[in-house]
Image (cartoon, coloured by chain):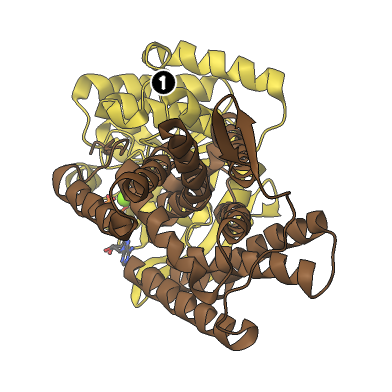
Amino acid sequence: MLLQQLINGISVGGIYALLATGYALIYSLLGFSNWAHGEVAMLGAYIGILSVTALQMPFIFAVILAVVGAGFISVFNEKIAYKRIRDNNSPTMFLMIAAMGLSTTFQNLAIVVFGPKFKMYPQILPVGAVKIGSLSVGLLDLVSLGIAIVAIIGLEYLITKTKFGLAVKAASSNMGTASLLGINVDKYIMLVFFLAGTLAGISGILYGMKYTVYPQLGNVALKAFIASVFGGLGSVQGAIVGAMSIGLLETLVSAYIHSGLRDLITFILLIAILLVRPTGLMGKDIQDKA
Amino acid sequence: MLKIENLHAAYGGIKALRGVSIEVNEGEIVAVLGSNGAGKSTLLKTISGVMKQTEGSVQFDGEEMPRVPYQVVGKGIVHVPEGRQIFSNLTVYENLMIGSFLRKDKAQIEKDLIEVYELFPRLLERKDQYGGHLSGGEQQMLAVGRGLMANPKLMILDEPSLGLAPLIVNQIFEIVKEINKRGTAILIVEQNAMKALKICDRAYLMSTGVIEKSGKPEDLRNDPELMKAYLG
Ligand SMILES: Nc1ncnc2c1ncn2[C@@H]1O[C@H](COP(=O)(O)OP(=O)(O)OP(=O)(O)O)[C@@H](O)[C@H]1O
Ligand SMILES: [Mg+2]
């Protein structure tokens, strides 16, 4: 029973992690909290569900369309709002305010265009559970966890082992100097938004399949935000650890204490972290020496 | 190789450059000297495309320089900025790799890396440390080494001696000379005029956005009025 809950917990954590890593990447690069990130996941989930139900597309194509679509929506936010604000040399606070505006806009648009009702993803995977010994784990949870793990390993590889990752780390450390040394910073920012958007899209689809799809689905990004603070703002590894911890915590609280306390405890955790260890579990504090 | 003509640049209403013309020839070390706020950094920023000029031209090997920094370095000019500007959350090695970001010649990059480690043995010792954990002098070495990794034809240096102990300053200047000997032209901006005049082939004296004088270091040094005004 406990083992089952733990697997369930990390599976939910994986969905949060997909969202939290992209959020952390954007934060590390631009230093602002992208509140519209959850809406990218929400729109991805809608693109997926509508492609299958309204357009009768094969599921795999619907997923690809949703993931790529979410990537482009994320880039759209960067192009129409964030980039212009940066180019104006406006305070970073403006980026966050713009993100809040985009978030509300997308949520309301979704209500108007898709309707306020909850939508169910059609049954793609056979319902039921996989039995491993005396354990019985939901098939969807297992698949979801597998996908999250593959995506996160891919992301880790990109960041730690490729020239793309090096450029992003350099730009997040010092944009001006990165560009002096040949890095087209705006291009890499755009690529990061695309990458973060695709991860959010995957997250949105998995979340929609586990629960339902609805216009406020993007509020789940708050969990990603907490995960990111918990792990250390701007740290991708921190976001993964934070997301897994929150997934586990929520599942265990729901199972053994009371499901009504789930969010309460998560938020108490957030406040505790902010008070006790504001740099998070893996936050960096490498400062420039004068 | 570098030919700057009648360069004007401004920050809003503040005219920081008012018709600057300078030249750097193949193989030279050229110094631009002047006090705080003379416009030295602005001149370098305009060369590397960080600032856009309102008037005038920046030509390199007969070609007008692009006005986007990330394209300028590909043309063979690397700007080592004021205040070192190390990537603090990258290791020393990663900092150096960013220097060679645009290059494709893997084998030559390896050789240049070895050469940089030869010039700065300290960087080899600390290659896996974060840039932010280096001392000021080590950071300056890293900034110069990182610039070298771009394999520049011309290196422009903004006050490499800033805030460093005299011993380290001497070291840095020796290395600048050595880099020049190995075939890279140097344009160096300094407040430490005596030191800069010792290593340069020619110097320009700048104040409030204009070049006031230029010449060989020995001539400038022998001009008592200039010595008083610029060199303290
Ligand atoms: N970002 C900026 N915004 C507005 N004015 C600026 C800016 N940077 C420089 N200036 C102004 O432009 C002029 C030239 O500055 P610059 O930094 O080029 O001087 P400098 O010769 O490099 O001085 P220092 O030796 O102190 O580095 C100064 O009057 C300065 O106040
Ligand atoms: Mg300066």
Identify the residue shown where x is 37% and y is 40%.
A245
Residue B141 found in image quarter: top left
Q: Position of residue A2 (x, y in %)?
A: 40, 33
Q: Position of residue A148 (x, y in %)?
A: 58, 42
Look at label 1 and name its amino acid: Ile
Q: Is residue A142 left or right of residue B118?
A: right
The answer, for residue B38, to whether it is visible in the render is no
On screen, B223 above or below B117? below
**Chain letter tied to brown:** A
On screen, A132 above or below A173? above
User: Which residue bears the numbered disc 1?
Assistant: B175
Q: Chain of mark 1?
A: B
Q: Position of residue B166 (x, y in %)?
A: 20, 24
Q: Is residue A230 left or right of residue B67?
A: left
Number of numbered discs present?
A: 1
**Chain letter tied to yellow:** B
